[in-house]
Amino acid sequence: MSQGVLLEKQIDCFHCGELCEELTVVHDSKSFCCHGCRAVYELFQETDLQDIYDARKEFKTKQGAYEHLNNPDILNKLLSFQSDDYNKVKLILPAVHCSSCVYLLENLNRLHNGVIRVNLNFTKKEADLHYNPAKVSLVELSELLASIGYPPKFDAEPQKKTSQATSRLSMKIGIAAFCFGNIMLLSFPEYFGFDELGDNTFSRFFAWINIALTLPIILYAGNDYFISAWKGLKKGFINIDVPIALGILTLFLRSLYEVITAVGPGYQDSLAGLVFFLLIGKWFQSKTYDNLSFERDYKSYFPLAVLKQLENKAEVSTPIQDLKPGDKIMVRNEEIIPADSVLLDGVAHIDYSFVTGESRPVKVRKNEIIYAGGRQIGERILLKLTKPTSHSYLTELWNNPVFKKTDLFNVTLLINKVSRYFTLIVLSIAGLAAGYWLMTDPKQVWTVISAVLIVACPCALALSAPFANGNAIRILGRNKFYLKNADVVECLSSVDTIVFDKTGTITSTNSGQVNYEGETLEAMDTAVLAAMTANSTHPLSKQIGESLKVTEPAILQNFSEKPGLGLTAQYNNNSYKLGSEEWVSGIKGTEKGTKVFISKNKDVLGYFCISYTYRKGLLELVQKLRKRYEILILSGDNDHEREKLASVFGDRDMYFNQSPDDKLQFVEKLQQKGKKVMMLGDGLNDAGALKCSHVGIAVTDDVASFSPACDGIVLGEKLSWISKVLEFASNARRIVMISFIISFAYNVLGIGLAVSGMLTPLIAAILMPVSSISVVVFATLGINYMAKKRHLM
């Protein structure tokens, strides 16, 4: 390969097509306008994607096709997040079809340094594009995608896309049915042996008409199989459509050979029936999957509420689906902004790490836009919604790759590995079967090859886990136990160690008493404390705030919350602290019990003594869990409750005075020992431990509390169901394994019958979709049965 040489000549760049300036870079006998274009060409070569230069000719963009994206009004509607150096937009990429496409698009940042990252949803052919607007515009990125064969669409109506795809499939089914029916009609003389009674001229004529009727089937009704197979092969990837396309092609070529040489009538009826039943199967699969879909229900049950401010200034907790543009909401420290809004009042420091992956609080001024998914750091702020809320967008944030855990249970890895090599195995079996039948009965070769290629189906293997676990999270959601995705069900089934936080986790924040001891608090001090607790989502803050019964809290300055320590704020040049004894007074904790101290200008005023009750059914829960799991307590409180807890958890498995960082390190040490840890905490002080654990579950009595770093959310009233949920997760794993065995048995039996010559291509076409549907139905019904057995339905 030649090195880059600079020449003085004006020619078109091989990569981008732009006219090169005076200096041209020559590499591998091709000319490039710059070293960047040459580098992209080398990337395509390294990853066997150089044929993209041929493919992009099909998608050549018209001049100015994306110029409308420069319009600020249009851009604002399309972007889900924007700042000076970070924009996010959702694209639809219909040309995506294989693993090479995924690789190329997720490495788009190597083609342009303005791209930050691309998260591709392969099944939906959608991508979240994150880019730096200071380096590249959306117009330029759209043109770049079009130039490499992926012209983007900006469509906010997925329902419309789905109906168009369904209409196209219905049209193909109709054409296949018409051709199939007429081919069978013209084949009646052959079926009843009438063609042997006289002149075979009509039989030959009908055979040629049948060949003509198979052309619409090959060229239109069944063309998706050929297109998909060809695109896969061009990228060096053998997908499931390869054996189907080979089966169809085998029948057509064999039929054409027999008609041309007059050695037989051909297999046109089998070919037409094959494509017809494949399309019917695809349609029925689509309807079955839609009816059994869990995603819609899952999003409906996902819990999140915010404080809505009414016209009389009163605040009520409101589910986000009941909010609409124009509503005013209060957002407290660490809470998520549910929809695009403008700031009306308060000091806003917004952390967009759940959107961008970078924790860098941004100060927002009054009347400026705050985007959905941001998290307020500091005092309460008043916002006015400018866009409708979206459950789907918030669940996307929850599944941000930043929080992705890679240690999945082995069932999924096993299924993915088997599915990956399935097609190669099927092609090998078809080749061996062809060799055997060529030696024993050559007439059977075409039937056997076609049947083997068509009856084999890895779809059922790949669908067993998503449908079983997807149905499981839908059922758990109905029982107020919310998981962020289906992978968490598998993770739950492999847990062997459970770590509980104490305050707000095994104790209830909705019961107990709060008593104040110390100097008499002035009305101003009480108003300040009420404002401080109103800004916090911590369970103890909530209890103290409710006990103060203040109708008009003070307006604070410089409020902040230190996880594991407490709250600070200023009011009228006075500094207040509310938190642990050591943090507030500087003296290591000597008081017993749960006490929250108050200081004003470094003078300790007193403390709130909080008594609480343990959640109902805690003793029975721990007794059940101890039979199968190692149980531990990690608490930030002192050990005044040790004796009471020892009777439930055991004295050696309790650890007190643990800071948030201590909890994180404790969980990491357990994992280093090979433990699969499930951590249950309040979602604020335990955020680090929840994120690093095998499964992190936030326990809350307030649906406004939402931490994207956790894997699940459970309402406190359902904590006693943890043992039931873990048993259900183990049941789901068994259902997945049984589904896998059923699918594997179907393929072994079907391929065995096809190899033996006992299966026609027509019957194979009927059986293939039936296998997928049966596995999906079994997985769904199996999960439903186990849920009823555990009283979850």
Image (cartoon, rainbow, N blue to C red):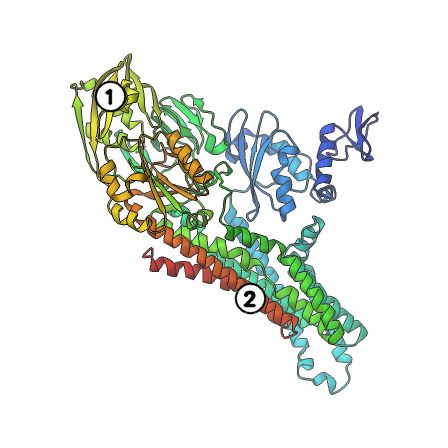
Q: Residue 65, percent across and down?
A: 65, 37
Q: Position of residue 754 (x, y in %)?
A: 64, 70
The image shows residue 88 at horizontal and vertical percentages of: 53, 33
Q: Is residue 584 above or below residue 57?
A: above
Q: Is residue 14 left or right of residue 674?
A: right
Apparent side of residue 605 relative to residue 22 in the rendered image (left or right): left
Q: Is residue 271 left or right of residue 360?
A: right
Crowding around mark 2 (Cα neighbors within 10 Å: few <14, some 14 to 19, many 20+) is many
x 65%, y 45%: residue: 100
Q: Which residue is mark 2?
A: 746
Q: Earlier in the sequence, mark 2 or mark 1?
A: 1
Location of residue 755 by image quarter: bottom right
Q: Is residue 792 above or below residue 403?
A: below
Q: Name the amino acid, label 1.
A: Ile
Label total for image = 2
Q: From this viewpoint, which residue is outermost toward the front?
A: 652
- Residue 509 location, quadrant: top left
- Relative to the observer, which residue lies in front, 331 or 651? 651
Q: Residue at x 68, y 57 (%)?
A: 226
Front one among 59 and 559: 559
Q: Secondary structure at mark 1?
A: strand
Residue behind mark 1:
598
Please report the residue visible at 29 percent of the width from the left and 12 percent of the height from the top.
573
